[in-house]
């Protein structure tokens, strides 16, 4: 262990123990949550995105990100019982990794150069594209160029809201909430005309409200989903290996089919992992 790591360990003992377990230097310590109180891993996910990251009414968690997180945690030596799920919203993901609230994040989290100043990413493990969700009876919104004068909803701290501000801000009234489910409520309630974020997220909501909501289906960005890690994490290579293993052994496809197989959204090819 390097001196810097030891100093970090004094400052945040629990986190360092779990990272040591991640690094494989003491592979048994991650197996039981009870042995020293250090054998757990805190994973940030969304709680309100069906098909991706969802806290169910019975207290369980489900979604593509949840299943990928379980697979990665298992590969790092943690059983499902060792995982502490933490709700991350779009705006607090970097902060949660910087201040140790979580050890890693799988929350429809796009890899961007700006975010890479503050955090590291393994992956990508999926490539989505920004799209629009409208009510099933809507006929006038057919793509991002048809939003003139429309009320559009997105989430603070997301690449989706940023793209609207950078590209379409003059003609669109943007309403920002802290979570996409609040945008869905506003869309169903008629307070907004469309919701914009990644197509896979929108597919999950459309699947939740069949016949009421539909995805426009004209993606206008590339969103490369990464596993967010604290800057300098020693686990990035191992997690990249695990992501590739999930492509090869069918776990990635199963995670998609189990959670979004009914959404009408087709699984694209697995992306090339970026070993930066
Ligand atoms: N993937 C985009 C992002 O990371 C939008 C989805 C989200 O906010 O979670 O900002």
Image (cartoon, helix red, strand yellow):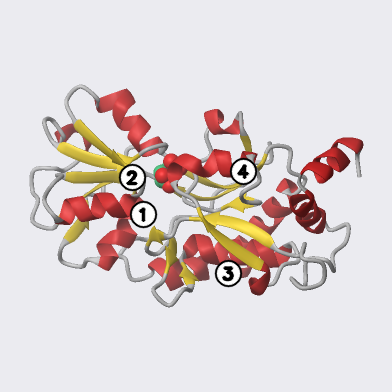
Q: Indicate which disc, 1 or 4, sits on the residue closer to the N terminus.
A: 4
Single out the mark in the foreground, 1 or 4: 4
Single out the mark in the foreground, 3 or 1: 1
Residue annotated with mark 3: 250
Single out the mark in the foreground, 2 or 3: 2
Disc 1 residue lies near ligand 1 with CB under 8 A: yes
Residue 97, disc: 4
Q: Indicate which disc, 3 or 1, sits on the residue closer to the N terminus.
A: 1
What kind of element bears circle 1?
helix
> How dense is the environment of label 1, judged by Cα within 10 Å: few (below 14), some, or many (20 and up)?
many
Single out the mark in the foreground, 4 or 3: 4
Q: How far apart in space, not on screen, are marks 2 and 3 (Cα)? A: 27 Å
> How dense is the environment of label 3, judged by Cα within 10 Å: few (below 14), some, or many (20 and up)?
few
Q: Indicate which disc, 4 or 3, sits on the residue closer to the N terminus.
A: 4
Q: Indicate which disc, 2 or 3, sits on the residue closer to the N terminus.
A: 2
Query: Percent position (x, y) of residue 179?
Result: 35, 49
Residue annotated with mark 2: 197
Q: Looking at the picture, tell me which residue is in the foreground, 136 or 83.
A: 83
- Does the CB distance between marks 3 and 1 fall below 8 Å? no
Disc 3 residue lies near ligand 1 with CB under 8 A: no
Residue annotated with mark 1: 201
- Does the CB distance between marks 2 and 4 fall below 8 Å? no
């Amino acid at each position: 262990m390097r001196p810097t790591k030891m100093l970090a360990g004094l400052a945040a003992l629990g986190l360092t123990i779990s990272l040591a377990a991640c690094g494989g230097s003491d592979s048994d310590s991650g197996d039981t949550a009870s042995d020293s109180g250090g054998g757990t891993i805190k994973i940030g996910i969304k709680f309100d995105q069906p098909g991706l990251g969802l806290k169910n009414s019975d207290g369980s968690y489900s979604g593509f990100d949840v299943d990928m997180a379980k697979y990665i945690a298992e590969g790092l030596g943690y059983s499902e019982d060792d995982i502490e799920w933490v709700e991350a919203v779009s705006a607090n993901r970097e902060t949660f990794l910087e201040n140790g609230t979580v050890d890693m994040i799988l929350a429809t989290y796009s890899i961007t150069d700006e975010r890479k100043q503050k955090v590291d990413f393994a992956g990508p493990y999926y490539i989505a594209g920004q799209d629009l969700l409208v009510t099933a009876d809507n006929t006038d919104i057919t793509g991002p160029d048809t939003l003139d004068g429309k009320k559009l909803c997105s989430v603070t701290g997301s690449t989706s809201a940023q793209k609207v501000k950078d590209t379409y801000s003059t003609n669109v009234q943007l309403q920002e909430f802290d979570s996409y489910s609040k945008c869905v409520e506003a869309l169903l309630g008629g307070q907004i005309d469309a919701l914009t974020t990644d197509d896979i997220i929108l597919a999950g909501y459309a699947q939740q409200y069949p016949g009421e909501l539909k995805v426009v289906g004209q993606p206008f960005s590339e969103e490369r989903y990464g596993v967010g890690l604290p800057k300098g994490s020693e686990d990035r290579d191992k997690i990249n290996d695990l992501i590739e293993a999930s492509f090869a052994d069918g776990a990635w496809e199963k995670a998609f089919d189990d959670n979004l197989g009914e959404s009408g959204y087709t699984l694209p090819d697995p992306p090339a992992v970026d070993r930066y």
